[in-house]
Amino acid sequence: MGVNKSLHGMASNFNHPVQKYANTLPYMLGGLTLVCLVLLMLSGMYMALFYIPTAQQAYSSTLNLIENVPFGEYARSIHLWAANIIIVMIGLHLARVIITGSYKKPRRMLYFVGLAMFFTILFLTYLGTTLTLDQIGADAAIRSQQTAALFGLSIPISQMVGPDAVAHTSIMIVALLLLLAIHMYLIEKIGISPKVTKNAIARTTAGEGTSNFLTHLKLLAGFGCILTAFIGTLALISPAPIGHPGVYDPTIMITKPVEAILFVNDKMLDVFGPYSLIWGPALLFVLLLLFPLVDRNPHVYWRKRIPAMLLGIFILAWALYFIYIDATAPTQYSGICATPPSNGVCVPALAENQTVENVTVLENESLGAGTKMYFISNGTAATPADVYGGFIDVPSKTQGETPYIIAALVVLAGAGVVILASDRLKRMYR
Ligand code: HEM
């Protein structure tokens, strides 16, 4: 009897009314962000079974994941692609929220909580790039160490991977899940913002609508399957790369700027130094905070909110500028030679850490004391094989697993199409 009652309660909870327009793609973008988050957590948990967050073993345990763990490289590639796509999804979700004026009272708190989630995810992504401790990871770890030092946390660079891993896999995830619970609770309580018409006013809509939450969930599952198959296909076609073990040298950045994730570029680094990792995101945060604070009239129609629309266009241009910086930066600022190249640019006879014109010789911490690496500014090494800063080829198990992966992707994409098509047919013949 009791079980029956609670099952009935659960079913009616899922069957509450939902506005019909909430079943369209623009209003599913928040849910699709959640799909990416689930993929990130599942792939992350799998990798955490094999990853060892110490300076000595972070790199080798990642290599082991790629080379020896079943679906290890594929899980890592899903994680990388989902991390990229979640930022695109949040950007689109945020754009929809801004265009439909959904940040206005009574949804202000919902918007602020969303902003907090966005920045938690940006920092999570940045910290994630440090964990492999290849050259990109080492460069990002140097920056995170310099920023931590601003808060009085003086941790040696080579020890940074432990705290970075704890923040990435536990503290920030817990914070994110708490924020997500509040986000969802507020949506349920206030309802989705009203349909945008010329005279629509922001207001509570909970309990309104001629569709229901079950239908919304079914459609979200359809779109979610297709998105998952898309991310899975990207992961198969373009697996996550890995570089050589990183060299820690705070005076030279060898790889391209991962800081672009936090809206930081070289010019900012010149002006603000390590503070850039705070100022870059803070600037974007303040700009996004302006929407509900400045645009206070209750109208949601875009023509009645021209200043907010202009601010949105400005922020979009700013974000595109950073994407452009990231896409056009050289893949590495400098080359590191595994062996001295034949053109004589990389000279093995230099003393350790001595800079002569463009050439520096470094001791490589991760390869062990006494292993020298030869570093050339401006990537002028003779052949790609001589350059130690780029990515390396690692034999992985993915090739043998490909037929299973393709079968799973086809099933997922097919399920997505069937779910969406069946809903469309049902509506046509109703
Ligand atoms: C992890 C990131 C996020 C997740 C999983 C998420 C999830 C969701 C979901 C499922 C909805 C329901 C409707 C929809 O999908 O559009 C929603 C609505 C909403 N979200 Fe998010 N969201 C995230 C980030 C953000 C961000 C960054 C903001 C803004 C700064 C934001 C602000 C809002 C607002 C204001 C609504 C209500 C929209 C309306 O009533 O029309 N969310 N979110």
Image: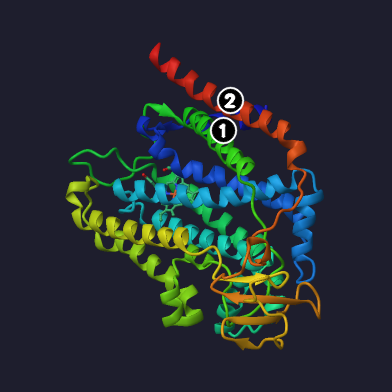
Based on the displayed image, in which of its 4 quarters is residue 137 positioned?
Answer: bottom right
Is disc 1 surrounded by few (<14), some (14 to 19) or many (20+) residues within 10 Å? many
Where residue 374 sits: x, y (%)?
A: 68, 76
10 Å crowding of disc 2: few (<14), some (14-19), many (20+): some
* Viewer-proximal residue among 247 and 48: 247
Q: How is the image coloured?
A: rainbow
Residue tagged 2: 415
Q: Residue at x 56, y 64 (%)?
A: 126
Q: Residue at x 66, y 31 (%)?
A: 406
Image location (x, y in percent) of residue 111: 39, 55
The image position of residue 17, as x and y in percent, is: 42, 31
Marks 2/1: CA distance? Answer: 7 Å
Q: Most extreme residue toward the top, as rendered?
A: 429
Report the amino acid beneath label 2: Ala
Q: Is residue 138 visible?
A: yes
Say which amino acid is labelled 1: Cys
Please tell me which residue is depicted at 71% across the width and 54% down the height of the picture.
393
Q: Position of residue 383 (x, y in %)?
A: 63, 63
Q: Earlier in the sequence, mark 2 or mark 1?
A: 1
Would you say residue 50 is visible in this rendering? no
The residue at label 2 has a CB less than 8 Å from ligand 1 = no
Q: Secondary structure at mark 1?
A: helix
Residue 265 as seen in the image, left or right of residue 382: left
Question: Which residue is labeled 1 in the image?
Answer: 225
Q: Examine the rendered structure and indicate whether residue 316 appears above or below residue 287.
A: above
Say which quadrant the C terminus sits in: top left
